[in-house]
Image (cartoon, helix red, strand yellow):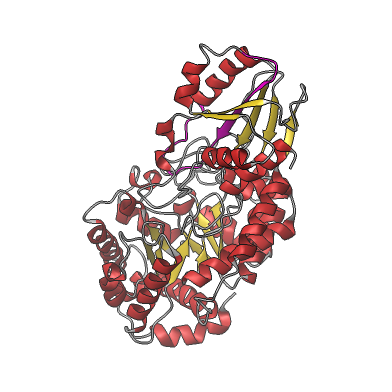
Amino acid sequence: MFSTYRERAARQVRHWSLEQKVGQLFILAFPGKQAEAVRTLIERYRLGGCYLSQDNAATFAEARQLTGDLDRINQATGDAVPLLLGVDQEGAWSVLMPESTTGPGNLALGHADDVSMTASMYQVFADEMRSAGFNCVLGPCADVNLRSDSPIIDARAFGSDPALVARHVAAAVAGVRQGGLVACAKHFPGHGDTAVDSHRDIPVVDKPLATLLEQDLLPFQRAIDAGVELIMTSHIRYPQLDAQHPATLSAPVLRGLLRERLGFNGIVISDSMNMGAIRRNYSPVEAAVLAFQSGIDMMMLSEEHYDHQPDYLEQQLAMIDGLVAAVRDGHWSEAELDATLLRVVSFKLARLSGIAHYLPLAMREHQALAQRAAQAAVAVLADPAGNLPVSAEREVFLIQTAPQEAYHGLMNARGIGPNQHVAAFDVLADSWFGAHKQLHAHSLTYEVAVDWLRSIRVQPHMLAVAVLENYPLPGEDFPQAPAQALLFQLAEVFGQQLLVISLSNGQMRLPAGVSHLCAYGSRPCSARAAVRAALGL
């Protein structure tokens, strides 16, 4: 893919030390908002890139300062290769919140099923991240939601139909490219058929290759056909492909399947090697050597930073030094290291040089697109009692179905995930109260509603509106059991005078006979779209 830059890359790296060759293959996270934190890694090891999160920059101004400082440190090393600066701006996960535009998330985009809208939404992601100084969108998720109970993918995927997901993955890749950045399809060979979060341990997907090709792998093939430059691996074991190791550490998966069978000739990057799936089962250097031997080109290390360990950077230096020692000891050949290095540097020279950063943005147009996308996704799934649209004469009780303690992870101290300052329920309630025709509405938290149900006497003009939310949180769950229990209690009291609004995937089992409106996402634009649909605006 980047062969025309190979000779230039070879000239550029021919005098590099072994430490610098190895360092160029690492993408590291770091705590705080100062580029100085990684100066040593850049100057001594020619660090390959940084995974940047909300913890590093919460606003466009902070991001521009940080990325500019990183570039200045890198350029001062002389004959520099661009740093890969990657961010999880993929819709349901995001950075620079609340300033950046997230749209409604991939699941909503897939339900709207307008590939031109998906491409436009991903171009917005790229335009905004490029303006912030980043050069890589770590998206789209090419996972297929084959299990509705996936704790980590859910709204990050475009849907459960492989062909639909494939269409939208290809559109997303095209949108990022149109926005001037590089895209990264993830999590190969697919994280959508798992009930275990790989931030915690190794999931297992026990399916034959033929089934994988029809289901999980189809979106990755379309991403490759669309010219995606990076693919991120998953820490998932596929025993019918490799009985011993997860995909990130598997030559049959990376060399045999991804390179040879699917024809990918871009850059293979690992998901974080510090996630629980790896850390609980392999020593750091063992895992690194296995990964590079198996076909990884760039290795991402970030999860230890998310735990805010005070010796984080020292641990990363130890990882790089351990891999240097492994090359010197012959556990990974220097010839293979050089081949990987040339592939990485050729890619960077071809695609990361000369990107026009820090340009002004049309944020009003971006937000308008996001709202249109959210509106296009909303669907009425059931309305047997004719509760929709909600009449202005109804007395409405808006009920938050998640306990207050459930929301602490939305603004995760690790800097990844939704990074959503305001819960979707609060946005929905504010929007509902702001609707000129809806005069009789009350907002109840989960805790208040549980007590309120013991004493409420339902009148014919009343309507309970129960709001379901779900967020894909790394390493933890947004609890669903309390919400489902409360729904059935509400149905016992209100009967068919109950409307459920799902700011989620709409897959929760509901009481019989209730009305159900689904927005397929928990972003603010989805909450506002749900209100407009519920009130017939």
Query: Front-most of 102 and 432?
Result: 432
Q: Is the magenta stretch mostly helix, strand or loop?
A: loop
Q: In this view, does 352 lie to the left or right of 223?
A: left
Q: Residue at x 66, y 35 (%)?
A: 438
Q: Which residue is drawn at 66% across and 58% down?
A: 368
For the N terminus, the image quarter is bottom right
Q: Position of residue 118 (x, y in %)?
A: 68, 57
465 within the magenta span: yes
**Residue 40 visible in the picture:** yes
Q: In this view, does 374 lie to the left or right of 484?
A: right
Question: How many numbered callouts?
Answer: 0
- Residue 7 sits above or below residue 300 on the image: below
325 within the magenta span: no
Residue segment shown in magenta: 458-480
- Residue 422 sits above or below residue 467 on the image: below
Query: Front-most of 476 and 440?
Result: 440
Q: Where is residue 44 in the image (x, y as percent from the top left)?
A: 27, 76
Q: Residue at x 45, y 74 (%)?
A: 339
Q: Residue at x 57, y 47 (%)?
A: 524
Query: Front-most of 460 and 346?
Result: 460
Q: Is residue 263 left or right of residue 470?
A: right
- Residue 231 sits above or below residue 474 on the image: below
- Residue 250 sits above or below residue 20 on the image: above
Among the 4 quarters of the image, the one containing residue 436: top right
Q: Where is residue 431 in the image (x, y as percent from the top left)?
A: 60, 42
Q: Where is residue 323 in the image (x, y as percent from the top left)?
A: 31, 63
